[in-house]
Image: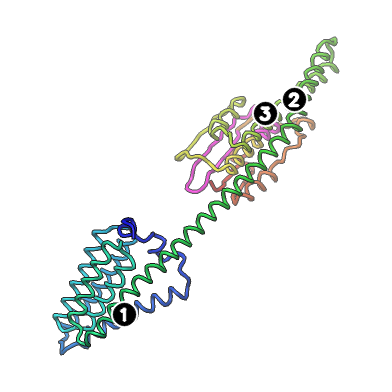
């Protein structure tokens, strides 16, 4: 064996109950319950003890049970000296029980310490601890040297087999975790490749189309501007300018969507402040700021965009108040407008935005909620999504 074999601990996966099948767990707990019952029975029936002695013995059994639990915790955390101290305390309790005439609990404790040390401690510490426990067992056992030798050998073999079984289970759990991580990385890589393909398609089709549309609209604006001023010419020019502005906004939103797909997204707070720049209003941020998931960030951006678009259409000149709040496990967005509400012509209210229904569907797909309706002074849109 190498030096590392002697000094290394069993893995945390091996020492924990993780991955242990139900039948094996039931057997393990049954063995522990049987040993505890045996210790209790031996403590109560050994000798002619009075009520006080029996009470002290029961308290000792409970103390040993707590010490064994503490040993399992410290060994799980790979803390050598506390584990050895607790093991020594159990052996001392066994010696005390032997001196008090409770031989069966003492034998159970020594045998349990021998097996458990081999199962859970580094071999450099487990072998001496097991040797001490089995030597104490052999010193008090009166069933003959052959039975003692077979018992001690069987206990050593059982402890080492339990150690190997636990290590095999721990290795299987580590391999399973690595396989899951590899599959997750593969799925993430496939998703990134698909996003890159979508980005290229959107850029080649939509972005180029919008850019060409902007060029033609600008040319149309210049041609119309050369015509003599008149009511018809001014109305056409106004519509062309509005169409060009909408095309510019669409191109900007397309570029933002492409950046989001690439993972190159500015913080939500900066986006909201930039969004409200052209409006009379303010942005308030509450809670401890943190990076949001891509889906949550995109939902907040799209809902804020749609809410401000509705304000421009239905309440021109209204003051817009945007509040972004970071909550435990989720993020909340509220867009509220005040004043400026007045009817506008039919063409101004028309559009192809996804509207309130689209915002609500986006929120529900993420496990969130969206509420929209009249407030005290205007219209309120409230979004909550996990983040």
Residue 202, x across and y down, in percent: 72, 35
Up/down of 137 relative to 213, above or below: below
Up/down of 185 relative to 140, above or below: above
Residue 271, x across and y down, in percent: 57, 31
311 left or right of 233 in image: left
List the residue tagged with mark 1: 35
44 left or right of 280 in image: left
Q: Is residue 305 visible?
A: yes
- Of the numbered discs in the image, which one, if any, rests on residue 211? 2
Residue 332, x across and y down, in percent: 54, 43
Up/down of 78 relative to 357, above or below: below
SS type, badge 1: helix
Pair 1/2: label in front: 1
Q: Residue at 31% of width from left, 76% of height from top?
A: 155
Which span is picked out in magenta? Answer: 308-337
Up/down of 230 relative to 70, above or below: above
SS type, badge 2: helix
* Residue 42 position by quadrant: bottom left
SS type, badge 3: helix
List the residue tagged with mark 3: 252
């Amino acid at each position: 064996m190498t030096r590392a074999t002697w000094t290394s601990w069993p893995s945390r996966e091996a020492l924990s109950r993780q991955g242990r099948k139900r039948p094996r767990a039931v057997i393990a707990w049954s063995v522990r319950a049987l040993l505890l019952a045996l210790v209790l029975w031996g403590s109560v029936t050994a000798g002619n003890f009075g009520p006080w002695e029996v009470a002290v013995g029961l308290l000792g059994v409970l103390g040993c049970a707590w010490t064994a639990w503490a040993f399992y915790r410290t060994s799980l955390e790979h803390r050598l000296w506390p584990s050895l101290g607790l093991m020594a305390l159990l052996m001392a309790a066994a010696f005390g029980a032997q001196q008090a005439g409770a031989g069966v609990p003492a034998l159970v404790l020594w045998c349990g310490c021998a097996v458990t040390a081999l199962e859970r401690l580094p071999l450099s510490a487990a072998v001496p601890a097991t040797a001490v426990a089995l030597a104490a067992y052999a010193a008090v056992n009166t069933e003959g040297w052959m039975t003692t030798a077979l018992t001690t050998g069987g206990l050593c073999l059982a402890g080492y087999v339990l150690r190997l079984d636990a290590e095999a289970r721990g290795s299987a759990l580590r391999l399973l975790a690595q396989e899951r991580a590899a599959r997750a990385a593969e799925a993430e890589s496939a998703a990134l490749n698909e996003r890159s393909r979508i980005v290229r398609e959107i850029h080649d089709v939509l972005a180029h189309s919008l850019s060409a549309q902007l060029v033609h609209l600008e040319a149309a604006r210049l041609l119309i501007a050369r015509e003599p001023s008149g009511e018809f010419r001014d109305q056409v020019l106004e519509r062309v300018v509005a169409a060009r502005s909408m095309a510019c906004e669409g191109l900007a939103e397309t570029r933002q969507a492409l950046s989001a797909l690439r993972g190159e997204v500015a913080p939500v707070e900066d986006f909201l402040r930039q969004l409200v720049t052209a409006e009379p209003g303010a942005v308030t941020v509450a809670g401890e700021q943190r990076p949001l998931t891509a889906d949550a960030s995109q939902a907040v951006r799209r809902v804020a965009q749609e809410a401000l678009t509705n304000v421009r259409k239905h309440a021109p000149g209204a003051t817009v108040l945007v509040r972004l709040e970071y909550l435990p496990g989720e993020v909340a967005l509220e867009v509220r407008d005040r004043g400026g509400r007045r009817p506008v012509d039919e063409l101004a209210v028309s559009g192809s935005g996804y509207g309130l229904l689209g915002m609500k569907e986006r929120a529900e797909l993420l496990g969130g909620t969206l509420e929209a309706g009249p407030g005290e002074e205007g219209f309120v849109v409230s979004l909550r999504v996990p983040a």
